Amino acid sequence: MSAPSSSAAPVAGAPHPAALSPSQIPILRVEHLTMRFGGLVAINDFSFTAGHGDITALIGPNGAGKTTVFNCITGFYKPTEGRIALQFGDPVVWDELEALTERGTRSVARANGMLFLLERMPDYLVTQKARVARTFQNIRLFQGMTVLENLLVAQHNPLMWASGFTALGALGLRSYARAERAAIDKARYWLDKINLAERADDPAGELPYGGQRRLEIARAMCTDPVLLCLDEPAAGLNPNESAELGRYLHAIRDEHATSILLIEHDMTVVMEISDHVVVLDHGQKIADGTPEEIRNDPKVIAAYLGVEEDEVADGGIETRS
Amino acid sequence: MVQEASRPASRVDLVRALREAAITALIAFGMFLPLIGFNTVQNIHNELVLETRWPLLAALVGIIAVGRFLYALLMAPWLARRAMRPRKQHGEGAVWRARLGRWLIPFTLGFAVVYPPLALSVVGFQGAVKWIDNFGVQILIYVMLGWGLNIVVGLAGLLDLGYVAFYAVGAYSYALLAKTFGLSFWLLLPLAGCLAAFWGILLGFPVLRLRGDYLAIVTLAFGEIIRLVLINWVPVTNGYAGISSIPRPTFFGIPFNASDEGFAARLGLEFSPIYRTIFLYYLILALALVTAAVTLRLRRLPIGRAWEALREDEIACRSLGINTTNTKLTAFAMGAMFAGFAGSFFAARQGFISPESFTFMESAVIVAIVVLGGMGSLLGVAIAAVIMIGGTEIMRELDFLKVVFGNEFDPTQYRMLLFGFAMVLIMVWKPRGLIATREPSALLSDYPVAATAPLGPRSDVAEPPLVRGHGP
C-alpha cells in the first residue's frame, strides 16, 4: 500500500508536518470559518483540524451548525470568511499553504502531494479534484436507479475519461469496455462489503433503511475519496446496525486510506469509533479533544444538558445504548 | 353474514346514489346553463338573437344524472369490493405481458418497415399517398420529436416546454440555407442538427441554473421568443408569409420529378408522387431509429447514467463530483439536435414553412406524448405518438359522423377535448405513463465474477507516510 515514512520527502524545518506522528498530520484544516445567512451567524470563527487517518467526530446540540460546516467543506456553501485547506499525498505541501492563499488560486500540485483551498472550489470539484466525498443527513440515493447503477454513477468522472467524453464509448471501443468492467468490479467489491450483492439489480429506493445508509456510504467511497464526510450515518439505525456501522467505518479507514469526518448524535457511536471529537455549540467550538476528554468536559455537558455552566458538576455525558 | 349485511346497506346505497345524482345534476345544470342552454344566432337582418335550447340542456343534465346514479349504485360498490380483494399473484397475466413485451418491439419495427408496400397493395397508388404521408410520415415525425424530447424530459428530468423552438431552428436552417446557397439536403441535415444543438447550448446556459417549474416557464418563453423572431425578422424569414418552394430532398442526388433525370424515369417506372412519399417515409423512419439507437446507447454510457441520476437527485450528483451544468447542457443539446434533424426533414417534406407550424401547441403536444408514453420509455413514447397523432388524423376520416351530427360537424374541432380526456384518463389509470417500468442500464448478473483477483484496497495513489490512524 502506501510508502513507509522513510521514503517521505526530507524534513526541512523543525516543525515540519512530516516530523509529526502520522495522526498529527492534518488532512483538513478549517481556520476561522464564519458563515452568515443574512443577520444569522450560523458558524462563528470556527477552527479545527482533522488528522490523516483519523475518524474525527463533529458533535453538538441540534442547530449548532454542524451540517453548515459540512456544507462549507464540501463546497455546497461559500463560507463568509475563513480558510478550509485539504491536503493529500506528501504532507510537505502544507508548507505552501500561505503562498497558495496569497496567490488566489485553488490548488497546488507537487510531485506527490496536493493542497486545495476548498472554499474556493465549486461543489463538484471538491469531490472530483480534492477527493472529498459526503453523505447526507436525509439519505439522497438515486431511488429509481438500481443499487449497482448508484455505484456506477459515483464513478462518473473516471468513466467519462475512459469513454473519451462519450465519443469513444459510443463507438464501443475495447478500452471503454475494460474501464466499465473495472467499474463494475469495484462496485461489486463494495456490494460485497455492505452485504448488498444479492440486491444489486433492485431499485435503491426498495432497500431497507439500514441498507440505504450503507449504500450511500459505499457510493461515496466509489468516488475514491481521501476524506469521507458522513452526516449522521447512524441516524435511524438500531444498536446492532450501529455497531456494524462502526466496524464498517473502521474497515474503510484502515483499508482504504480514507480519513473520516462525521456528524453524529448517537454518543455511543461517537465515543466508540472516533479518535478525535470536536464539539460545536451555537456556531462556536466549545471543546476539542479525545473522546475521553470530551466525555468529562463540563462545557460539553452544559451544552448538551442545557444547564448553566457554574451548575455543572463533574461527571460524564450519559451515553445512550 | 354477508347476505345480512348487504340487505340494509343497499337501501342506504340507493339513497346515497340518488343524492349524488342530484348534486351532480345540479352542478351540470349550473355549468351547462350558459354553455348549452343559451345560444346566440345571427338572423337574416344581421342581428344577434338569443335562442334557448332547453330540451338539449335537459337531455344532457338527465344523461349525466342517470350516469352518476348508476355509477354510485353499481360501479362504486363493485370497485370498492375489488379493492378489498387480495391482488392476484403473478399469474397468467404477467406471463402474457412478458410475452407481449418480448414480441411487441420486433413486431412494431417489422410493421413500420413493411407499412408502405402494405398500404400500396391494400389501397392502391392513389389512396396510399394519404395513408403513408398523413399517417406514416406525420406520426414518425412526432415519434422522433418525442424520442428527442425524451432525452431532455424523460432521462435528464428537465421540463422543456419550448422544445418546438429547436424544431423551428432546424426547419428554418434547412429552408434558408438550401434556398440561399443551394446546398443539398444531405449536407444540411447534419448542419441543421448542429445549429439546433448550438442554440440548445446557447439557450441552456442561462436557464439551466433553474429547476422544475421555473425551468419550464423560461423554456416556454424561449420557445415563444424564437417564434416571435421568426415572425418579425421579415427580411430573413419572410415573417408570417413563411418560406415557400423549399428544395425537396433527392434520392442521393436523383430528384423525384417527372423529368428524364428523375427517380421514376431512371428506374423505368411511371412517374408518381408516391415514390417521394415512400422515400420520405423511410427517411424519417431511419432518422427516428437513429434517435432511438443513440438514446439506448447513451443510456448505457456514463453520460446517460448521469442524466438519469440528475433526474433523481441533483444535489447527490454534485456530491459525487458530477458537473451538473455540463451534464444538463449535453442533454439539452442532444435533445435539440434531434429536433433540428426533424425540423429540417419537416421543411424538406412540406416545401413550405411558416411560424404557424411552431406554436406553443406543438411543444405541448410533444410534451404530452412524452408524459403519456411514460417518461424515459421509448416504446411508450412511440405508442403515445401513434395514439395522439394517428388519432388526430383518424378524426379527419370520420365522415360518417356527419350523418349523425349534421353537415357542419367537424370531428377535428374536438381534438383538444379528446386530448384532455386522454390525459385525464392516463393520469388516473397510469400516473407514470403508459409504460412506467424502467430497464436498468447495467445488471450485475450480466457481469460474472472475473477469474482474476478481485479489486483490493486502493493502491493507486501516493499516500502520506502512514495512513493508519494509530500506532505504527
Image: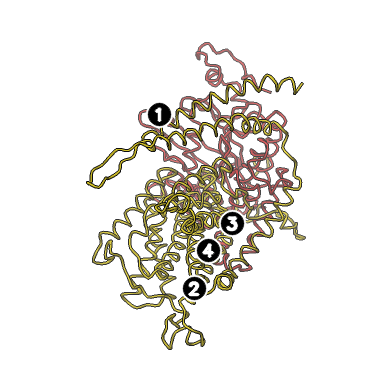
Chain colours: A red, B yellow
Q: Work out which residue is located at the far front of the displayed protein and give it.
A: B44
| Location of residue B289 in the rendering, given as x and y in whole percent from the top left corner | 55, 66
Q: Residues within 10 Å of mark 2 (few under 14, many from 20)?
A: few
Q: Residues within 10 Å of mark 1 (few under 14, many from 20)?
A: some
Label located before the other in sequence (4 or 3): 4
Relative to A119, does residue A305 appear above or below in the rendering? Answer: above
- Image quadrant assignment for residue A180: bottom right
Spatial CA span between label 2 and label 4: 31 Å
Spatial CA span between label 2 and label 3: 32 Å
Spatial CA span between label 1 and label 2: 79 Å
State the mark number for residue B126.
2
For mark 1, name the chain: A
Mark 1 residue type? Val
Q: Residues within 10 Å of mark 3 (few under 14, many from 20)?
A: many
Spatial CA span between label 3 and label 1: 53 Å
Q: Secondary structure at mark 4?
A: helix
**Relative to residue B75, is residue B278 drawn left or right?**
left
Q: Are marks 3 and 1 in contact (CB under 8 Å)?
A: no
Residue holding disc 4: B291
> What is the total number of numbered labels drawn onto the structure image?
4
State the mark number for residue A52.
none
| Location of residue B280 in the rendering, given as x and y in whole percent from the top left corner | 48, 72
Residue holding disc 3: B379
For mark 4, name the chain: B
Residue holding disc 1: A41
**Relative to residue A33, is residue B472 drawn left or right?**
right
**Relative to residue B446, is residue B397 drawn left or right?**
left
Mark 2 residue type? Gln
Q: Residues within 10 Å of mark 4 (few under 14, many from 20)?
A: many
| Callout in the foreground (2, 3) | 2
Front residue (pair A241, B181): B181
| Callout in the foreground (4, 1) | 4
